[in-house]
Image (cartoon, rainbow, N blue to C red):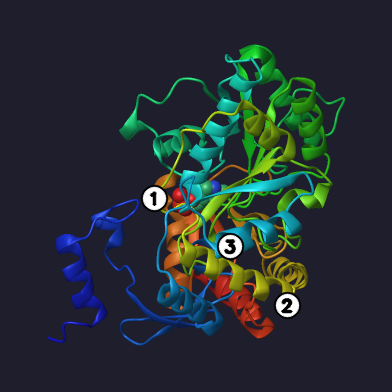
Amino acid sequence: MDNNTETSLLHRDAAHLIHPLHSPKGHVGGKVWVGGKGAFLIDANGDRFIDGLSGLWNNTAGNGRSELADAAHQQMTDLAYSSGYTGSSNPRAIELAERLAAITYPNINHFFFTSGGGESTDSNIKMARYYWKLKNKPNKTKVISRIWGYHGVTLAAMCATGINSYWPMFEPRIPGFVHIPCPDPYRYRSSDSSVSVGIAAANELEKAILEEGADSVAMFIAEPVQGAGGVIVPPDDYFPRIREICDQYEVLLVSDEVITGFGRTGTMFGLEHWGVKPDLIQYAKAITSGYFPLGGIGVSDEIAQTMEDSGKPWMHAYTYSAHPTGCAVALAMLDIIETEDFPGQAKQKGARLLAGLRSALSGHPHVGEIRGLGMMCAVEYVKDTATGEMFPAEDAIGARIHEETVARGMFSRVRGDVYALAPPIVTEEQTLDDMVGILADATRAVIG
Ligand SMILES: Cc1ncc(COP(=O)(O)O)c(C=O)c1O
């Protein structure tokens, strides 16, 4: 038998590989990817699939971008690696920090690099705790985040992540992590009818701060649009109120831009939609379009100055921080993002995708909500649209719809019965329309 057919590769895979979210049963019928071009992936049998989630939300520029490969090749040839520890630097890291200072929020001008999102969450938690110690408020250590928030799964990041299926195998969690409800306009129910849903959901933060004691809370971390939790777009008044609460109680606002950064939602960074400036940001994924593992944090001038004034070293580090090759790829990617206007493209194409989904699927008796912002969309399937009642988990509606979309040439991900669509920003309009058609057919195949 050919050793490289998909079936045979999966057999060899099962013998030795442990996967993220490892599940031998879930891997049966998995895909083995061998190639890609633009918004398409090619499997080991030579079949072509629309990359409905840009890999894992990261590959906004699509596959086959020779500019990114050339940048990596050139940098690896000149200097493959050098330490980023104090005492060493490299030109690509310096240039990247300069470019990020120009395009991130105006108060964020100092950058530390990691290899991905989870490391960035840990770095921000450590930065926030250190900042408050320097401010003589050493008890401000707690982290508040949201249910359905995803911030990675290193131990500290896992504790911030608000999807509780990630916890039980690894308990006990680190003390001092608190979760508040998320501002899901479809599901959030407030007992306070005197204010809007967005304000009520933001006031959950104030409630938690008061319960915990403001002198014990270091930071609040939130994705501008919750991604892995099911593409939850907050009401417009949510983040402005969150900023007010953070200011009032001296809690640092951390914007997790690992998915929303670099254009995905139609602005360069997510909180720009609501005119809000965070104290700390984190990014990864699209900064290199997934071509190299690179992430990092961005720090406000106030926090950077406080660190600087302390005169002490920050005892936090990664071997691959400011990796020259990663930074070179990120610089080439920023050229693409800027010259091809990724925020503008995401805005326009995302609106087309959302309108297409709405026209094909709204009114379906089991489609509860169709939502999105820029090139981040989702369809939520429910048993009863009048009440929002969910299908029983054992019906596996989301998983079955996913299977049907794969059979029709599209590969994405589901969270329960929420089907997410976040294709590369370069996806052509015809392909966006095809995605809508595939999801509509798959929906009919499973739930009529
Ligand atoms: C918003 C957000 N933060 C953090 C992470 C974790 O990133 P990584 O998987 O690179 O650790 C992710 C991953 O999907 C994410 O979506």
Query: Is any part of residue 83 visible from this angle?
Result: yes
User: Which dot marks residue 339?
Assistant: 2
Q: Residue at x 79, y 51 (%)?
A: 272
Secondary structure of the residue carrying numbered label 1: loop
Q: Position of residue 219 (x, y in %)?
A: 63, 28
* Mark 1, residue position: 319
Q: Secondary structure at mark 2?
A: helix
Which is more N-terminal, label 1 or label 3?
3
Residue at the spot 46% in from the left edge and 65% down from the top edge: 402
**How many angstroms separate mark 2 from mark 1 (CA)?**
32 Å
Which image quarter: residue 443?
A: bottom right
Amino acid identity at mark 1: Thr
Residue 373 shown left or right of residue 240 in the figure: left
Q: Is residue 107 above or below residue 315?
A: below
Q: Quadrant of the C terminus?
A: bottom right
| Viewer-side residue, 250 vs 213 | 250
Q: Nearer the viewer, mark 2 or mark 1?
A: 1
Task: Say few, some or many: other residues with alpha carbon within 10 Å of mark 1 (under 14 / 14 to 19 / 20 or more).
Answer: few
**Are the residues flagged by discs 3 and 1 in contact, CB closer than 8 Å?**
no
**Alpha-carbon span between mark 2 and mark 3:** 15 Å
Asked if residue 99 is positioned above or below residue 339 in the image, the reply reads above
Residue 282 sits above or below residue 141 on the image? below
Taking the image as drawn, is residue 181 in sight?
Answer: no
Residue furthest right as drawn: 194
Number of the front mark, 3 or 1: 1
Element type at mark 3: helix
Residue closer to the observer: 425 or 401: 425
Residue type pointed to by label 3: Ile
Residue 197 percent across, percent down from the top left: 79, 35
Name the residue nearer the viewer: 272 or 77.
77
Task: Write down the residue under mark 3.
Answer: 287
Q: Residue at x 19, y 63 (%)?
A: 14
